[in-house]
Structure formats: structure tokens, C-alpha cells
Image (spheres, rainbow, N blue to C red):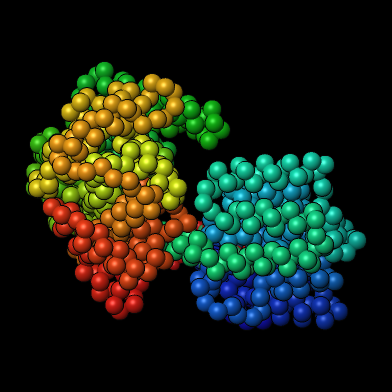
């Protein structure tokens, strides 16, 4: 048919093969090839049935997301799928790998489905701010019933082939993941009697209508509103699924198309598509020689059995790597190993891992109190106390204990990697691997490239990050790297607003309303207000600003460290999270002493100050080359700081706001600012330049 869709005959069965690497996305040539293949098969009297399959590692993983930003091209997917479904020759679809989005929609437009045991089937469009737009909201409920369809589409989570078989989404599961074996099973299906009645068209199935279906939809609308706070697509998806019960198929399909197009044109979908590609590009570091192969890493040493160290040890063990966990005190070591066992046990209870997996993971982690056990490790991740002196001593020790090629990483959140590397004779093998807390849960890893870090060390760290399932971004050295450096500007504004008259809950609610997972002060209370306090005192170049994090410092000076002391910005005694009266009094008094007059502060002002502070610092980070791409900054904020995915990250959001608007708003804050704030609010040159040129920040 064309280079991506071919047809060959197996006796009287036409085998249509889609071969469009890497994931067989339904780009225009695939749609055109499919249209032609189905139409030719219809006219060919020698063809009794059709098997539709894919070459390569997966069935179709969806529409081609890259096409969404461009003008639509014929033939459109819904029309192609209607032609597949209308075929008079039975269409048997052979599924392996993933059948996602438009891929599953294509499979459902076929008449029968045979899947490999490891195949995953799903409609993940809401992850992209979309709804299924080629019949998924109508054909899925016809096959599985509305409840599973609601779950699969609103959660965007795929299901296993076994579950799909149980619920009528596939007709046969082949106990193999080999695409050829699935093809053979589909051919056997095609020559068998299963389809003696001819094509079984999904559109003709009457959707089972649960008696209390209105209640079911109400339930999904409210729970989805909470789970997917701020997002439009899941609600559109629920409306569309409801049409499978209250409208004829063709009218419901027309509605689905209308909602799909509205979602596709929305800023939310643009942002989520940006996030999708940003997460895939961040592992490709510009300028890094792609031919460099990573060093082998099988055995990892982790220093520190506290919250971070134990979480880091679990990341490696869960990926099958051997771990030696070092902690000098026996009590702390045993406490850490106990914590690891507890966390794995919890995962087992929640059904995330099997009992045997739990035992295997635990067995991979051995505790030690001696550096001699690091003599043969391939990688060390140090997660000790945040003190330059402590870290330098540890690295000097590692330098003399480990093999000369062992990669040495620090998990420091702020400290200068170059200064740490100077404590070793081989600074080229030193870098930062900055995990986010809880390390065994959070996907993000900042890989900090020191001045002398070799390309091979960087490649090895990125490779190991991928093996442990992290989204890794390479960043340069500066105070706080990318994430925490920006967070400190965001927190700086929250602190300033507290002295200007906003309460902790005013600030947190404004930011949650904007879409952040948590407010900054609730985060500080949770992680411990003293953590930032100590980090600020370790700083080599603290800002000469008496107001810098003054509110947080005031809490620490009054022994209010947050949740751990049951007293911080919030009151934890009442059981409800309320502004703590003492904290508010302390802040008022301090503001009075500093001559800051309390005023009414609007929700908009809070949101603007905090988000613009992020954008401005992000632009400076780009100017300095600390991040290679704006999209890396977005990935860091989406995966490490609870930034709403539907806003795409701070750099993407700046583009949505319009850079001229961003600069105008920053200038307005600058005009009113005094003292150190005057320099914080100088708009980054990059923002000004782009506002003039009209180029996008997120594409830098
Ligand atoms: C949809 O279908 C809408 C319809 O309802 C209606 C239409 C009318 N398009 O993730 P990986 C690229 S919406 C274009 O690293 P893995 C990806 O960018 C779609 N490109 O591999 C990367 O490129 P590069 C619904 C795509 O093995 C390469 O493939 N479907 C697409 O870790 C490898 O990707 C989805 O949302 C695409 N659809 O994971 C599924 N998908 O090498 C999206 C991937 O240049 N895809 N690429 O960086 C996935 O979830 C994962 O890619 C998958 C494989 C699980 C399939």
C-alpha cells in the first residue's frame, strides 16, 4: 500500500502490517495506507478475512502526537476506523506490546482481538489533556460496560490482557509476547469458526445500562474532579461516555469528536503534550557524544541510612541492583534497614509487589558500618548530612577506598559539587545525583554535571537513572541547581508575603487553587522548617537581604519547626489545618519591627508573585546554561515540585501567558519593590529579548 502499511496473503487471509517505528503511531501515511488496504480487501473476492497487526516492538501506541499542533490531514482517523468496522470481511486484530489511544480505538473498530499475554491496553488520552477522539468513548463501554470504561479513560491507566479478556475487550490471549506467535494465533482465529456469523461490529453492541447509571456518573464526576483537579478533559470524557447510553452511536461519535477537538485546541492539552515530549527529550543531553557507552553498574554503595539514603537504596534494589548501605552507627543502620523492610511490606500489602519480589528486594540490600565494603562497588551515592566539611571527608575516604573507576555521586540538594570533587584525586568521576523525597517514590532525578565530570560519568549516571525508572535531567552547578534554586525564589516570595500581611493559609490556598499540589508553607511545615534554615547557614554566598526567608527563620528561632514539633505555620493541635495564631502573631510583630505595613493581599497577587518569581529565575538559569533546555526546567518542576501538569511547567506557562505580559508584570512589581527585592525583580534579559523577538521561552 505504502512504505508503512503493507499487505501479504496467508492463504485467503490478507495480513495488513503497520510498520511505523518507533511505536507505530497513526501518522497520516499510516491512516492513508490503512484506508487503501481495507478498501482493496473489500474488492478482492479471494480474501475471506483480514488480520491487522504491527511490526516492531508494539502495536499502535496512539495517534501521532506530533501532528496535533499542525493543521489536520486527511484521511481522519475516525473515518478510517469506520471503514475498518464496516468491512464485510472479518477483521481480526493481533495485539502485542501496547495498544494505546488511537491504537486501542483501531483494535476496537476491528471485529475480533487476539492479544499477547503481556500486552497493555488503554486509552491514556486524558494524560495529554484530550479525550479519545476516534470512537474510544463509544466502543469501549460497548465492549466492557460503562464502569470499566469510565475507570480506564479517566485514570488513563492501561489494563492487562488478562483483565481485557475477562471484560470482553479481547477474545483470546496468547501465552507469549512474541509478535509472530500472536500473528499465528490471529491466523488460526481467522481460519476457525469463531466468526462464523461474520463481522461482529462493536457499534452494534447495545451498551449495558446499569439501573442506577445516573448515580454512577455522578460518582465519577465528583471523584474525578478531586483526582484530576483543574483538568477539563476527564469531565468531557465522562460526558462522552454517558452519550454511549443516551444517544445513538453516530450522534454520540459526533459529540465525541466535538469534545476532542475542543480539548485538542485547549491550553491544557498544549501544556500536557509539551510535558510528554519534554520528558522524553530530557535524557538526551545536547552536546553529549551519543557513542559513549556507560560503565557497568551492578553494585551500588549508599551512604546514610536516613530517610533519603534508605529511599535511594530501595530505588536500586527494586531495579535488581545489589546495594551496600553504610551507616556508621549500628542503631541508625538497624533503624534504616527496618524502615526499608516496612516500606516494602507496605508495597506488598497494597498489591504493588509480590511477596517473592519483596523478599528478593530486601535480600539485595546489605548493611555495613565499614567503608572497606565499598572496595568493589561500581557507584556510590552519598546521602549524608548536608555539610560541606562532612561531604569532603566522605569523598576523600571514598577516593582511597573505592576502585579508581567507581562513579562517586552526592545527593546534596544545594552544595557545590566542584568543591566536593576537589576532595578526590579523580574529580572526573564525581557528580551529583539529586533524588527527591521520598526517593523511592518520586520520579525525578537531577544529575549534576560538575566542572570536571567526564562525559562517561554523566552517561553512566543517566543510564543508571533510566534503569531505576527515574526521569533524569542533567543540570549544571549552582546553589540549589535548577529545582531548589527556583524553589528558593518561590519560597522567598511566600515568606515576604507573610510579612506583608498574608496568612499561611491565604498563600497555600491561592497556590493550590492555581493548581500546585500543595502550598509552599504546608510543604515547609511537613519537611521541617529547620531544614531550609540550616541550608541557608551553609550557603557560601548568602543574599545580603535581612528579609530573605525572615518568616521561616522566625519560626525556627521560636522553636516552631513544623509538623515534627506540632507547631509551625499551622496549628496541628485542633486536628484541622488552621493558621497557627501564635505564628500569625509572631509574624505581625516582626513586620511591625521591620516597618512593613500590613495590607490586604489578593489571591491573584499571591499567585502572580510566586509564579513570576519562578519564571524569572528559570530564565536566568537558562541564560547561565545551568539547564540546557527550558523544557528540562519544566520536567523538573512537573516531577519534583507538584507543578500542575496541565500548565506544562513554569517555562511553558510563561509562553501561554505571553512573554510581553510576563515582562510587563515583572516590571510592575519591580517598580514598586525596594531594597533587595529591587534586584530580584529585574526581568531576565532572556525574557525581554524573547518578548521582542516573539520566540517561545519553552523552545529555548
Ligand atoms: C490519541 O491516540 C488520540 C486519539 O484518541 C484520537 C485521534 C483522533 N506519537 O515513551 P518512549 C515517541 S493520543 C508520536 O520513550 P517507551 C516518543 O516521543 C495518543 N510519537 O518509549 C519517543 O520518541 P523519541 C495516545 C510518539 O518504550 C519514542 O516514541 N497514546 C508517540 O518508554 C519512544 O517513546 C499515548 O498517549 C505518539 N503517540 O514507551 C501513548 N508515542 O525517541 C504515548 C511515543 O524521539 N506513548 N512516541 O524521543 C507512550 O505512552 C509510550 O511511548 C509507550 C512506549 C508506552 C508507547
Is 274 situated left or right of 183 in this image?
left
Q: Is residue 682 visible?
A: yes
Residue 500: percent from left, percent from top: 25, 44
Image coords of residue 202 (percent x, y): 80, 60
**For the point 37% across and 41% down, which residue is it?**
506
* Residue positioned most to the right: 197
User: Could you tell me how many numbered marks the image carries?
Assistant: 0
- Please say if 517 is above or below 106: above
| Residue 397 seen in the current view | no
Q: Is residue 48 left or right of residue 231?
A: right
Q: Which sits in the foreground, 94 or 265?
A: 265
Q: Quadrant of the C terminus?
A: bottom left
Q: Quadrant of the N terminus?
A: bottom right
- Quarter residue 333 falls in: top left
In percent of the image, x 47 and y 56: which residue is there? 646
Residue plotted at (72% across, 42% down): 216
Nearest to the observer: residue 351 or residue 326: 351
Position of 298 compared to 163: left or right? left
What is the x, y in percent for residue 188? 78, 59
Q: Is residue 543 left or right of residue 522?
A: left
Residue closest to the eye, 301 or 598? 598
Residue 377 location, x and y as percent?
A: 25, 39
Eyeballing the image, is 492 above or below 368? below
Report the residue at 24% width, 35% height from top: 588
Q: Which residue of the protein is positioned furthest toward the top in this rendering?
A: 331
Amino acid at each position: 500500500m505504502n512504505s508503512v502499511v503493507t499487505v501479504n496473503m496467508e492463504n485467503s487471509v490478507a495480513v495488513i502490517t503497520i510498520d511505523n517505528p518507533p511505536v507505530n503511531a497513526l501518522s497520516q501515511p499510516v491512516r492513508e495506507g490503512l484506508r487503501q488496504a481495507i478498501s482493496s480487501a473489500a474488492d478482492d473476492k479471494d480474501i475471506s478475512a483480514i488480520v491487522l497487526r504491527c511490526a516492531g516492538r508494539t502495536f499502535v501506541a496512539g495517534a501521532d502526537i506530533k501532528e496535533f499542533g499542525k493543521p489536520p490531514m486527511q484521511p481522519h482517523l475516525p473515518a478510517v476506523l469506520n471503514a475498518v468496522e464496516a468491512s464485510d470481511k472479518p477483521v481480526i486484530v493481533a495485539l502485542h506490546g501496547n495498544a494505546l489511544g488511537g491504537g486501542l480505538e483501531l483494535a476496537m473498530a476491528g471485529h475480533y482481538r487476539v492479544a499477547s499475554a503481556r500486552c497493555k491496553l488503554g486509552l491514556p488520552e486524558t494524560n495529554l489533556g484530550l479525550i479519545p477522539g476516534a470512537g474510544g468513548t463509544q466502543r469501549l463501554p460497548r465492549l466492557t460496560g460503562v464502569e470499566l470504561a469510565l475507570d480506564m479513560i479517566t485514570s488513563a491507566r492501561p489494563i492487562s490482557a488478562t483483565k481485557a479478556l475477562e471484560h470482553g475487550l479481547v477474545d483470546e490471549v496468547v501465552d507469549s509476547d512474541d509478535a509472530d506467535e500472536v500473528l499465528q494465533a490471529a491466523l488460526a482465529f481467522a481460519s476457525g469458526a469463531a466468526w462464523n456469523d461474520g463481522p461482529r461490529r462493536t457499534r452494534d453492541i447495545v451498551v449495558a445500562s446499569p439501573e442506577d447509571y445516573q448515580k454512577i456518573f455522578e460518582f465519577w464526576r465528583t471523584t474525578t474532579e478531586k483526582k484530576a483537579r483543574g483538568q477539563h478533559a476527564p469531565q468531557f470524557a465522562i460526558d462522552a461516555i454517558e452519550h454511549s447510553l443516551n444517544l445513538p452511536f453516530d450522534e454520540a461519535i459526533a459529540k465525541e469528536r466535538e469534545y476532542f477537538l475542543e480539548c485538542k485546541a485547549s491550553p491544557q492539552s498544549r501544556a500536557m503534550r509539551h510535558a510528554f515530549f519534554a520528558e522524553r527529550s530530557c535524557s538526551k543531553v545536547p552536546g553529549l557524544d551519543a557513542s559513549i557507552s556507560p560503565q557497568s553498574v551492578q553494585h551500588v554503595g549508599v551512604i546514610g541510612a536516613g530517610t533519603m539514603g534508605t529511599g535511594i537504596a530501595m530505588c536500586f534494589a527494586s531495579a535488581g541492583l545489589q546495594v551496600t548501605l553504610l551507616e556508621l552507627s549500628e542503631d541508625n543502620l538497624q533503624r534504616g534497614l527496618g524502615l526499608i523492610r516496612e516500606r516494602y511490606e507496605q508495597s506488598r500489602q497494597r498489591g504493588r509487589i509480590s511477596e517473592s519480589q519483596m523478599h528478593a528486594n530486601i535480600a539485595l540490600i546489605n548493611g555495613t558500618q565499614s567503608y572497606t565494603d565499598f572496595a568493589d562497588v561500581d557507584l556510590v551515592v552519598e546521602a549524608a548530612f548536608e555539610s560541606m566539611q562532612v561531604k569532603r571527608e566522605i569523598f576523600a575516604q571514598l577516593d582511597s577506598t573505592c576502585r579508581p573507576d567507581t562513579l562517586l555521586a552526592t545527593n546534596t540538594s544545594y552544595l557545590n559539587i566542584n568543591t566536593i570533587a576537589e576532595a578526590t584525586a579523580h574529580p572526573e568521576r564525581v557528580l551529583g545525583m539529586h533524588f527527591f523525597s521520598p526517593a523511592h517514590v518520586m520520579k525525578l532525578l537531577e544529575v549534576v554535571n560538575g566542572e570536571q565530570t567526564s562525559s562517561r560519568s554523566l552517561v553512566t549516571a543517566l543510564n543508571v537513572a533510566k534503569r531505576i525508572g527515574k526521569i533524569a535531567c542533567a543540570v549544571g552547578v549552582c546553589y540549589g541547581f535548577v529545582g531548589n534554586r527556583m524553589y528558593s525564589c518561590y519560597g522567598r516570595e511566600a515568606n515576604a508575603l507573610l510579612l506583608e500581611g498574608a496568612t499561611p493559609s491565604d498563600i497555600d490556598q491561592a497556590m493550590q487553587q492555581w493548581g500546585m499540589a500543595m502550598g509552599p508553607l504546608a510543604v515547609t511545615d511537613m519537611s521541617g522548617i529547620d531544614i531550609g534554615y540550616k541550608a541557608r547557614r551553609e550557603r557560601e554566598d548568602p543574599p545580603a537581604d535581612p528579609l530573605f526567608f525572615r518568616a521561616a527563620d522566625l519560626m525556627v528561632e521560636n522553636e516552631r519547626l513544623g509538623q515534627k514539633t506540632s507547631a509551625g505555620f499551622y496549628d496541628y493541635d485542633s486536628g484541622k489545618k488552621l493558621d497557627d495564631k501564635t505564628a500569625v502573631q509572631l509574624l505581625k510583630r516582626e513586620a511591625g519591627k521591620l516597618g512593613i505595613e500590613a495590607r490586604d493581599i489578593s489571591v491573584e497577587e499571591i499567585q502572580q508573585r510566586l509564579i513570576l518569581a519562578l519564571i524569572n529565575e528559570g530564565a536566568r538559569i537558562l541564560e547561565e546554561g545551568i539547564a540546557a533546555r527550558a523544557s528540562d526546567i519544566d520536567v523538573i518542576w512537573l516531577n519534583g515540585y507538584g507543578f500542575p501538569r496541565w500548565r506544562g511547567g513554569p517555562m511553558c506557562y510563561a509562553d501561554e501567558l505571553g512573554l510581553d505580559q510576563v515582562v510587563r508584570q515583572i516590571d510592575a512589581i519591580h517598580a514598586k519593590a525596594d531594597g533587595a527585592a529591587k534586584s530580584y525583580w529585574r526581568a531576565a534579559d532572556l525574557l525581554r529579548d524573547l518578548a521582542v523577538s516573539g520566540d517561545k521561552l519553552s523552545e529555548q
